[in-house]
Amino acid sequence: MFRHETQIRVRYSETDKMGYLYYGNYAAYLEVARVEALRDLGIVYKDMEDLHGVLLPVAKYESTFVRPAYYDSLLTLKTEIRELPDSFIFFHTDIFNEENKIINRSVVKLAFVKADSTRCTAPDFILTALDSYFRAE
């Protein structure tokens, strides 16, 4: 299993009238977590698209809101890839507040698609990057 952590501070413009992180912004935070997790594996999202012609559109997004996040809170996003991808890759992300209490639990399922919009399986460079995290399991 591959694990990655990143942190994001809630900006004022991302909150609603109640002072909570607006629910629609969680998807953007999850994207940051995915991009940084892949970067940690040596995979640059832009290169994946521009050099390899592989795109990752979201196929499914599930999110459970446990408690609110507030303006200026430093959030920790803990992301896991729990299985080697095939034609889909799943990112499981739990978001914690500064008190280490969970505020959100999400799963994002992305499909592998070539630039011409045809479906494909996980490219070798992604499987190679993940291989060592799953070999011992």
Image: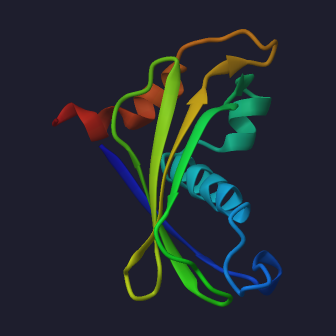
Between 111 and 15, the one nearer to me in the picture = 15
Q: Quadrant of residue 83?
A: top left
Left or right, residue 81 beside residue 69: left
> Residue 72: percent from the left, percent from the top?
66, 90
Q: Which colour assignment does the render follow?
A: rainbow
Which part of the image, by quadrant, shows the N terminus?
top left
Question: In this rendering, is residue 28 above or below 45?
Answer: below
The residue sitting at 72% across, 71% down in the picture is: 22
- Residue at the (79%, 31%) spot, across then down: 50
Q: Camera-side residue: 51 or 101?
A: 101
Residue situated furthest left in the rendering? 136
Task: Pinpoint residue 74: horizontal percent, then vertical percent.
Answer: 56, 84
Which percent across, then down, holds residue 71? 68, 88
Number of marks? 0
- The answer to whether residue 34 is above or below residue 70 is above
Q: Where, by quadrant of the figure, is residue 27 drawn?
A: bottom right
| Residue drawn at (68%, 42%) of the image | 45
47 relative position to 84: left or right: right
Q: Would you say 50 lies left or right of 106 here?
A: right
Quadrant (top left/top right/bottom left/bottom right) for the C terminus: top left
Q: Position of residue 17 (x, y in %)?
A: 80, 84
Is 115 rendered above or below residue 105? above
27 and 62: which is toward the camera: 62
Q: Residue furthest front?
A: 18
